[in-house]
């Protein structure tokens, strides 16, 4: 059975990291398409405020959970499905960016990044894929990043976690196909969100969270594996990283200003 794109009549949508930035904008975009969207994050107050302030079509429902607690994630999926029906569409979007400096690295920063971005996503997948496989229906989109394509200075934890997510999504795309479950990966370039507030480096072609949400929502209505945007940036990056490493690393070093001696 070929996987198909999910519709609001198939069940509810679940967006992790729905209290801020891309996740918040995407949840509202999906609700406007008629979905009941369960929004998750740790901050219950923020989720409640967003859900109760939403007045458009569809519905936002707050469900707080810390993705670094796999038992809580399993219990959340069980509770969401008992209360609202099957999760037809899951956008695994929660993630953190912690800058790491090679001169003064922090093991804690590596561990925290992998705990949320990688193990948090794995916890969601462990709760979702058995249920969707059994139902022979469902759609999962994992939010990675254009940083996954190749090395970027100060992103050794974030980039590694996001590259792993692309691989994870590709493996699951292969496996889930025969269960009729669609798996996609999302690789955005720079998006203006609170996560970018502390980042001082240049952010070429940065787009708003609302524009990102529209691009994601449009990609979720297709069956293509990768949803990437803005393409003038992400395709240029892909072209750079398709070069031999000795060229691409030198190019990125120059473009990011890391060719200057300290
Ligand atoms: N902004 C960009 O330029 C950009 C580019 C490419 C990819 N991305 C990716 O897009 C996704 C969303 O990013 P954003 O920029 O919208 O970030 P954001 O505004 O900082 O939102 C991150 C969300 O993740 C939630 N979260 C963090 N830790 C969590 C945990 N342990 N358990 C549950 N939820 C948690 C946060 O809520 P709480 O803190 O309340 O838990 C928040 O809702 C991330 O995966 C990011 O890596 C962003």
Image (tube, helix red, strand yellow):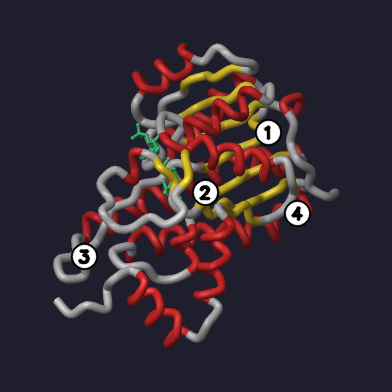
How dense is the environment of label 4, judged by Cα within 10 Å: few (below 14), some, or many (20 and up)?
A: some
The circle drawn on residue 88 is 1
Image quarter (top left, top right, bottom left or bottom right) of the C terminus: bottom left
Quadrant of residue 59 within the rendered picture: top right
| Whole-number angstrom distance, CA of label 1 to CA of label 4 | 15 Å
Read off the residue under disc 3: 101
Picture coordinates of residue 133 (x, y %)? 71, 44
Q: Where is residue 142 in the image (x, y as percent from the top left)?
A: 55, 48
Question: Assess mark 1: CB under 8 A from ligand 1?
Answer: no
Q: Residue at x 79, y 43 (%)?
A: 4
- Mark 4 highlights which residue? 177
| Secondary structure state at the residue bearing disc 4 | helix
Task: Please tell me how crowded label 2 is: few (under 14), some (14-19), or many (20+) other residues with Cα within 10 Å.
Answer: many
Q: Does any portion of residue 69 appear in the rendered image?
A: no
**Distance from the alpha carbon under mark 2 to that under mark 3:** 24 Å
Q: Where's ligand 1: which quadrant?
A: top left
Kindly identify which residue carries mark 2. Answer: 143
């Amino acid at each position: 059975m070929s996987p198909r794109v999910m519709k609001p009549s198939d069940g509810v949508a679940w967006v992790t990291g729905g209290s801020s930035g891309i996740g918040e904008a995407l949840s509202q975009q999906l609700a406007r398409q008629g979905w009941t969207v369960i929004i998750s994050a740790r901050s219950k107050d923020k989720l409640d405020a967003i859900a109760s302030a939403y007045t458009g079509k569809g519905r936002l429902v707050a469900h707080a959970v810390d993705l670094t607690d796999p038992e809580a994630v399993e219990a959340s999926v069980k509770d969401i499905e008992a209360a609202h029906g099957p999760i037809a569409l899951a956008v695994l979007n929660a993630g953190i960016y912690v800058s790491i400096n090679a001169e003064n690295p922090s093991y804690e920063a590596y561990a925290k990044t992998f705990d949320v971005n990688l193990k948090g996503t794995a916890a969601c997948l462990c709760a979702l894929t058995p249920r969707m496989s059994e139902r022979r229906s469902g759609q999962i989109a994992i939010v990675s990043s254009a940083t996954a394509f190749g090395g970027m200075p100060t992103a050794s934890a974030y980039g590694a976690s996001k590259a792993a997510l692309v691989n994870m999504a590709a493996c699951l795309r292969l496996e889930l196909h025969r269960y009729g479950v669609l798996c996609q990966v999302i690789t955005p370039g720079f998006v203006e969100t609170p996560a970018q507030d502390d980042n001082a480096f240049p952010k070429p072609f940065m787009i708003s969270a609302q524009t990102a949400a529209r691009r994601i929502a449009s990609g979720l209505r297709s069956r293509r594996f990768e949803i990437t945007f803005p393409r003038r940036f992400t395709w240029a990056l892909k072209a750079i990283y398709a070069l031999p490493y000795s060229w691409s690393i030198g190019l990125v070093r120059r473009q990011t200003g890391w060719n200057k001696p300290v």
